[in-house]
């Protein structure tokens, strides 16, 4: 299994078709034009390749929002459901590794759109994840939610207190990978109002400290 991270704009038509095939094999209802939109919206794409075939991909970017270094996760999918966890870990680890190189000695905000409770574990392991069970978000948290909703292009239907972007009945691009295992009941409750069939998504984010990113870089090499 090889993990390849590229500039999204460098994807050739045949490679774009491969990503669309992953979406179809994953049973995603998203139209193929979503891939083109993600290429425009996110500068990087990470792909997991085995036997010359793409089995998973994750669009993302490393950028600054208002001066704050950020890792943003866009559309992600995999056609290998039994290995979804390991494929997703490989792809997110590669973005963390690049973040450690791009933003040395800085804490980084990590954000993405999710709809499945199982994916909350990506944010639960970060510092000060938002939203989180039993936590009343601060004004600054809500301000970050609004910034991220605008960046993800879903601010028109965004609720900055629930951190939820309501759908319009059509599918929405998100981290579209449902991981195995049962989430904690409070996490299920947190995501209960989010209906992916309607296009609802939750914008979640948290902080990756500089030392944790440095550890990822040290473990996975330059």
Image (cartoon, rainbow, N blue to C red):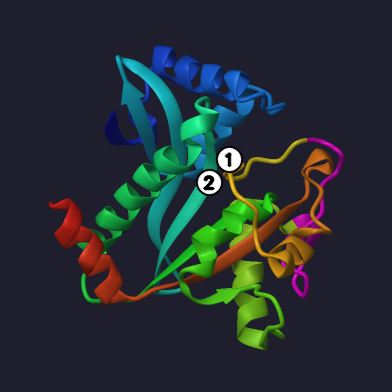
User: Residue 41 location in percent, x, y?
Assistant: 51, 43
Name the one closer to the observer, 62 or 177.
Answer: 177
Q: Estimate the x, y position of residue 47 in percent, counting from the top left.
A: 37, 32
Q: Looking at the image, is 75 positioned above or below residue 80?
A: below
- Overall secondary structure of the magenta section: loop
Residue 52: quarter of image: top left
Of pointers 1 and 2, the one earlier in the residue sequence: 2
Where is residue 20 drawn, in percent x and y? 54, 20
Residue at the spot of label 1: 177
Viewer-nearest of discs 1 and 2: 1
Horizontal relation, residue 32 to residue 42: left or right? right
Magenta stretch containing residue 49, yes or no?
no
Give, as a single range, the part of the protein colored magenta.
Answer: 156-170
Q: Is residue 141 left or right of residue 16?
A: right
| Percent of width and height locating residue 212 | 29, 71
Q: Residue at x 33, y 25 (%)?
A: 49
SS at mark 2?
A: strand
Distance of label 1 from label 2 (alpha carbons): 12 Å
Please rate how many residues cluster around mark 2, counting C-alpha atoms within 10 Å: few if below 14, some from 14 to 19, many from 20: many
Residue under label 2, please give it: 74
Looking at the picture, does residue 38 appear above or below residue 188? above
Residue 17 is tagged as none
Which residue is at 75% across, 36% downward?
Answer: 171
Depicted 157 relative to depicted 7: above or below: below
Residue positioned 49% across, 15% down in the render: 17
Question: Which residue is located at x 41 percent, y 41 percent?
Answer: 86
């Amino acid at each position: 299994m090889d993990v390849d991270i590229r500039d999204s704009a460098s994807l050739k038509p045949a490679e774009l078709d491969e990503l669309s095939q992953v979406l179809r094999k994953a049973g995603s209802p998203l139209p193929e034009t979503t891939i083109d939109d993600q290429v425009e919206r996110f500068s990087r794409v990470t792909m997991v390749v085995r036997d010359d075939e793409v089995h998973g991909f994750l669009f993302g970017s490393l950028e600054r929002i208002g001066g704050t270094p950020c890792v943003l996760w866009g559309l992600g999918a995999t056609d290998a459901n039994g290995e979804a966890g390991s494929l997703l870990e490989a792809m997110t680890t590669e973005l963390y590794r690049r973040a450690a190189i791009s933003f040395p000695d800085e804490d980084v905000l990590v954000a993405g759109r999710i709809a499945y409770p199982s994916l909350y574990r990506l944010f639960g392991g970060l510092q000060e994840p938002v939203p989180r069970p039993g936590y009343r978000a601060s004004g600054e948290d809500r301000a970050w939610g609004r910034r991220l909703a605008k960046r993800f292009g879903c601010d028109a239907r965004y609720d900055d207190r629930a951190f939820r972007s309501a759908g319009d009945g059509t599918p929405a691009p998100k981290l579209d990978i449902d991981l195995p295992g049962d989430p904690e009941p409070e996490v299920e409750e947190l995501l209960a109002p989010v209906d992916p069939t309607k296009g609802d998504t939750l914008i979640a984010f948290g902080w990756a400290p500089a030392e944790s990113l440095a550890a990822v870089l040290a473990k996975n090499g330059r």
